[in-house]
Amino acid sequence: MKLEKKGEFNLEEEIILLFRSSKMTVCLEGIDDKKIFHNILRHKSLDSKIICRFFGDGGRNILLAVYDHYKKQTKKARNPILFFADQDTWVFTGIPEKYQEVHFTKGYSIENDLFEDGQISIDQLLFPAEKARLEGLIDQISDWFAKEIQLILKGEAEKAKIDVSFLNPIILAPEASELHETYKVSPSTDEEIELSKQIKQNYRQFLRGKFLFELLQRINLDRGHKENLPLPAESHLFSTCIATGLSNDSSNSSRIATLLQNTLNSTPPII
């Protein structure tokens, strides 16, 4: 499967290209999503039958803009077109009715769904002390994340700062089990307390999946100072999670694979 060369985004041109596609097309938010879907397709030997596309660096907003235009003229499509997106904060509020036909992640993002699929395999890679450290950090991050998400839910998104990296040593120092004091906060309102409880009770779904995999990378970096047993790189962790998920019919990876296969089976490509 060839990677597209992306120039300046042009909505009308993208729609024309979609409608002219000679194969079923899956529209995604970005390059990382494309790599993940390509991995699933290869497992199911579907990579030669389905095209995966993304639309530059616009993320979900651009993807949904393409979807909006696609919906106005769906009959022009030569082959099936499916749209996949992260729920992001809609995981807390619900998906808007107008996007019910878009295929969204079960959790906050595709990383959440992969983490859930591979939880058993991930646990087997960690030492007991590392599991305890991971759980403690998840608990702290959930409190901080609840406060930031509550700002977004109150319509104050400009004040929220969730685009951070927990690989940043200023936020989480090497081998530390405590976040920097700026991020080690406690919920201060009833809404924040309830949201924090919700996140902690099901962090695989509600805590941003990017953070979960960054914590695993942090643990791996720290392990490298003491052990010659490195954890797999993130891309290999994704592959492990996908492989584990595809062995379980009720997993997120299997849900995606089944949808793609069923769509292919019901609508043969037009050459």
Image (tube, rainbow, N blue to C red):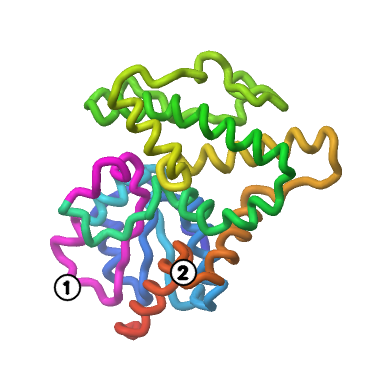
Residue of label 1: 75
Residue type indicated by callout 1: Lys
Q: Residue furthest left?
A: 72
Image coordinates for residue 255, horizontal then vertical, percent: 41, 68
Marks 1 and 2 close (CB-CB < 8 Å):
no
Locate residue 6, reporting x and y percent.
Answer: 44, 51
Q: Position of residue 42 (x, y in %)?
A: 56, 72
The residue under label 2 is: 254
Residue depicted at x 45% and y 77%? 49
Q: Position of residue 189 (x, y in %)?
A: 31, 19
The residue lying at 61 percent from left, 22 percent from top is 178
For marks 1 and 2 on the same chain, the one whose residue lies earlier in the sequence: 1
107 relative position to 137: left or right: left
Which range of residues does the magenta coloring cover?
Answer: 68-96
**Residue for point 74% across, 44% down:** 127
Horizontal arrangement in the rendering, residue 31 relative to residue 156 (left or right): right
User: From the viewer's perspective, is residue 228 above or below residue 45?
Assistant: above
The circle on residue 6 is: none
Given residues 85 and 143, the one toward you in this image is: 143
Residue at image location 75% in from the left, 33% down from the top? 222
> Tag 2: Cα neighbours inside 10 Å, few (<14), some, or many (≥20)?
many
The answer to whether one can see residue 31 in this image is no
The C terminus - image quarter = bottom left
Q: Residue flagged by tag 2: what amino acid is it?
A: Ser
